[in-house]
Amino acid sequence: MIDAISFKNGTFRYLDQRYLPLQELHVETRDHREAIEAIKTLAVRGAPLIGASAGYTVVLGVNSFKGSKEEFPAYFGQLIKDVEASRPTAVNLFFATKKMKAVYDANFEGDSLETLKTKMTDEAHKIYNDEVDNCDRIARHGVEQIKRDCADILKTRKLNVLTHCNTGTLACCGIGTALGVIRLAWQEGLIERVITAESRPLLQGLRLTAWELEHDGIPFISISDSSSAFLMQRGMIDFGVVGADRITANGDTANKIGTYAHAVSANHHGIPFYIAAPVSTIDITLKEGAQIPIEERNADELRTIFGTQVATPTTPVLNYAFDVTPGTLLRGIITEKKAVVGNYETGLREICS
Ligand SMILES: CSC[C@H]1O[C@H](OP(=O)(O)O)[C@H](O)[C@@H]1O
């Protein structure tokens, strides 16, 4: 398995995804500020992995505290704020800090700081291990849903699947969410070919998903984001499955910019389009997608391509990192608990209770 992140003996180790696929560079740190920077710069990325990394980052911060127990509450509060300021959209990050705060609330008064640090480390590992398990369950539910929805096609041939950005081990701790569904579907002989949309501007699809699929020996082709509608029109895509960064109570879903366009095209062509994500990505407190904070990133991510200037430094740019796909365009939302199909208000509330 690809070693995206790990935490051993107080050291956080991550594979710096900015250099993939051309260079596999692992970084080790015991400094929570460096770990926060790794999340901000997408050295570490992907909603579930961001959540797990946020948990370990809190542990790094707690471990480096040298003050008195009386000084700890203020320090811990600032640490949580700093971690939560790293990226705004993936709700997994806040799911993780909420878990870490719960350990603090339950144990600070009665425990020594050393015991508290141990309990927080255990919680961070639990966040990571739960996401590994969630991927396997999501994959199972996803494959069963695809077998139902694509049964007619499967009578005569295998399926061609579109995916966007990266939702594999590099994003999810385990086999992946959408890519986990694809991996299991491939193992079960359902997949002819994977079509990975490049995912401008940081090219998570062209660089990372392609690297993971090549690593697994799964046949794929990469396309420009704007090609998906044309391939659908030509009958080259049978279904789409992507990940998520935040899903609201009505099924509206924030995911990498470009997802909405794929979903509109899929809907136009009558092609099933799924979200695959753990329950930790569902924000049931938000009624609809318009409430999701959408990250705007540095304009130079568009003006340059990995260090090469392609537009003038003064070119005006709007660089949204995510868009929001209405639940009405989704065939289903596949979670570790079940595939929610149809009434998302009811179905999502049920699995979040
Ligand atoms: C399995 S969720 C991965 C999710 O996160 C990605 O965003 P980023 O690369 O900016 O962290 C993208 O939205 C993926 O779908």
Image (cartoon, rainbow, N blue to C red):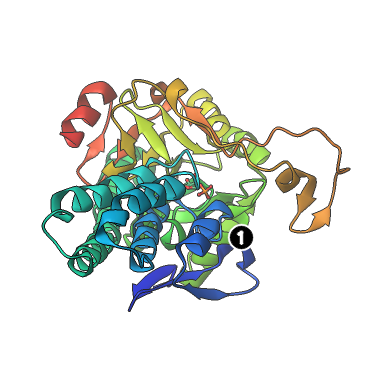
Specify the quadrant that holds the N terminus: bottom left
Q: Residue furthest right?
A: 312
The answer to whether residue 124 is left or right of residue 241 is: left
Q: Nearer the viewer, residue 214 or 117?
A: 117
Q: Nearer the viewer, residue 342 or 279?
A: 279
Q: Could you tell me which residue is drawn at 53 percent across and 32 percent down?
A: 294
| Figure check: 190 above or below 319 | below
Q: Nearer the viewer, residue 203 or 147?
A: 203
Indicate the position of residue 156 as horizontal and vertical percent values. Answer: 39, 47
Indicate the position of residue 203 as horizontal and vertical percent values. Answer: 63, 52
The answer to whether residue 352 is left or right of residue 28 is: left
Indicate the position of residue 316 as horizontal and vertical percent values. Answer: 80, 32
The answer to whether residue 78 is left or right of residue 125 is: right
Q: How many marks?
A: 1
Q: Residue furthest bottom?
A: 9
Residue type, mark 1 in image: Arg
> Can residue 189 be seen in the rendering of this structure?
no
Q: Could you tell me which residue is drawn at 52 percent across and 42 percent down?
A: 237
Q: Could you tell me which residue is drawn at 54 percent across and 49 percent down?
A: 165
The answer to whether residue 114 is left or right of residue 324 is: left
Give the image quarter of residue 334. Answer: top left
Indicate the position of residue 118 as horizontal and vertical percent values. Answer: 22, 68
Residue position marked by numbered label 1 in the rendering: 207
Q: Could you tell me which residue is drawn at 70 percent across and 32 percent down?
A: 318
Specify the quadrant that holds the C terminus: top left
| Figure check: 221 above or below 151 | below
Give the image quarter of residue 23. Answer: bottom right
Q: Residues within 10 Å of mark 1 (few under 14, many from 20)?
A: many
Q: Is mark 1 within 8 Å of ligand 1?
A: no
Q: Nearer the viewer, residue 191 or 337?
A: 337
Q: Name the secondary structure under disc 1.
A: helix
> Can residue 79 be seen in the rendering of this structure?
yes
